[in-house]
Image (cartoon, rainbow, N blue to C red):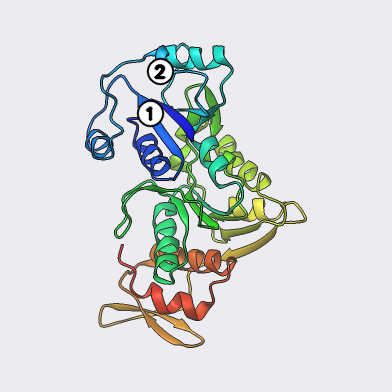
């Protein structure tokens, strides 16, 4: 039995990860927090993971723990963290533990300043319709998926929405730097999204480093309409293969958008240039794990944002 304790279990990402881990056989999950609000409170309660009282309790940290997972806002002086360090326990940030749980799987990570939630949702929708099991992390609740995090023994694929926000208050690395994807998608680098870096140059460099951290023989899918992504793609490691994407051929007829493909027109339930670009990125990502274009187009027509 693996016992895992979550410090700051009430966080948006943390409570989803705790629930996902608790559903795996041979895992026992505990947690602490100084305050928990809905929807985390209700969801933890339903899953029997709500702490019996709020606060930090060093006596909850013991040598029988297999791992301690830290929430984003846990500080260096947290009493439970100090106790875990004193006992020499294995301590992980949220993204570090997610990587540990999926290190033997093929990881698809979607990053960029915009569109990553939608592309992640599109990939998961296609895999679900094709009955391809996948673990996942997505930042929003998406239709047809019970939780925002899923982890299992059976899935051989993991799909993550990769955020560039810092890992935690004691680890300044961007979250998506820890996922080491086999397949990566980069949607674009926006100048108005640089709150996580002091300058735009530093912000753009986060995405360059993300590409450099890909697994050997990785596949990078990137929006070729972004000049900064073109620069990144032009200087990749020699073992990484890049796939540019743009707005696919399409027509709008009677208010319905159709993709123009070699096998005929595909009607969509979404519209707009960005969604068309997102579909193309999702298609290329799915193709890297064996989904044919025919399979993809057959099911993507049912995707609703």
Q: Position of residue 56 (x, y in %)?
A: 36, 15
Q: Position of residue 58 (x, y in %)?
A: 42, 13
Q: Where is residue 11 in the image (x, y as percent from the top left)?
A: 35, 32
Q: Left or right: 202 with respect to 28?
A: right
Instruction: Report the residue at 46% width, 11% height from top.
Output: 77
Q: Can residue 4 be seen in this view?
A: yes
Instruction: Report the residue at 39% width, 64% height from top.
Output: 125
The one of 178 and 31 positioned closer to us in this rendering: 31
Label 2 sits on a secondary structure element that is helix
Q: Left or right: 183 with respect to 44?
A: right
The one of 236 and 203 positioned closer to us in this rendering: 236
Q: Left or right: 121 with respect to 180?
A: left
Is disc 1 surrounded by few (<14), some (14 to 19) or many (20+) residues within 10 Å?
many
Query: Which residue is denoted by mark 1 in the rendering?
Result: 30
Q: For marks 1 and 2, give the CA distance.
A: 9 Å
Q: Position of residue 185 (x, y in %)?
A: 54, 56
Q: Can residue 78 be seen in this view?
A: no
Is disc 2 surrounded by few (<14), some (14 to 19) or many (20+) residues within 10 Å?
some
Report how many numbered discs are placed on residues in the image: 2
Query: Which residue is denoted by mark 2 in the rendering?
Result: 60
Label 1 sits on a secondary structure element that is strand
Q: In this view, does 88 lie above or below 37?
A: above
Q: Which mark is residue 123?
A: none
Q: In this view, does 114 lie above or below 88?
A: below
Contact between labelled residues 2 and 1, with CB atoms less than 8 Å apart: yes
Specify the quadrant of the image occupied by residue 72: top left
């Amino acid at each position: 039995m693996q016992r895992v304790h979550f410090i700051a279990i009430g966080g948006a990402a943390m409570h989803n990860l705790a629930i996902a881990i608790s559903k795996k056989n041979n895992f026992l999950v505990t947690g602490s927090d100084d305050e928990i609000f809905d929807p985390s409170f209700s969801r933890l309660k339903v899953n029997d993971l709500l702490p019996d009282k709020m606060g930090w309790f060093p006596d909850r940290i013991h040598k029988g723990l297999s791992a301690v997972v830290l929430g984003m806002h846990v500080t260096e002086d947290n009493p439970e963290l100090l106790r875990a360090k004193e006992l020499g326990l294995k301590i992980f940030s949220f993204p570090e533990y997610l990587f540990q749980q999926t290190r033997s799987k093929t990881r698809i990570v979607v990053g960029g300043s915009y569109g990553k939630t939608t592309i992640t949702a599109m990939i998961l929708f296609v895999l679900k319709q094709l009955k391809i099991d996948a673990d996942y992390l997505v930042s929003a609740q998406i239709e047809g998926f019970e939780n925002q995090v899923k982890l299992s023994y059976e899935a051989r694929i993991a799909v993550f929405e990769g955020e560039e926000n810092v890992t935690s208050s004691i680890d300044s690395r961007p979250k998506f730097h820890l996922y080491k994807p086999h397949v990566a998608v980069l949607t674009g680098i926006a100048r108005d999204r640089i709150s996580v870096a002091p300058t735009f140059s530093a912000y753009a460099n986060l995405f360059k480093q993300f590409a450099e951290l890909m697994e050997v023989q990785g596949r990078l899918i990137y929006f070729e309409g972004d000049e900064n992504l073109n620069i990144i793609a032009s200087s990749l490691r020699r073992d990484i293969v890049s796939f540019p994407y743009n707005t696919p051929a399409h027509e709008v007829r009677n208010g319905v958008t159709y993709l123009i493909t070699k096998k005929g027109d595909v009607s969509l339930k979404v519209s707009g240039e960005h969604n068309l670009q997102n579909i193309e990125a999702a298609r290329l990502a799915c193709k890297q794990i064996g989904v044919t274009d025919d399979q993809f187009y057959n099911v993507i027509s049912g995707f609703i944002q």
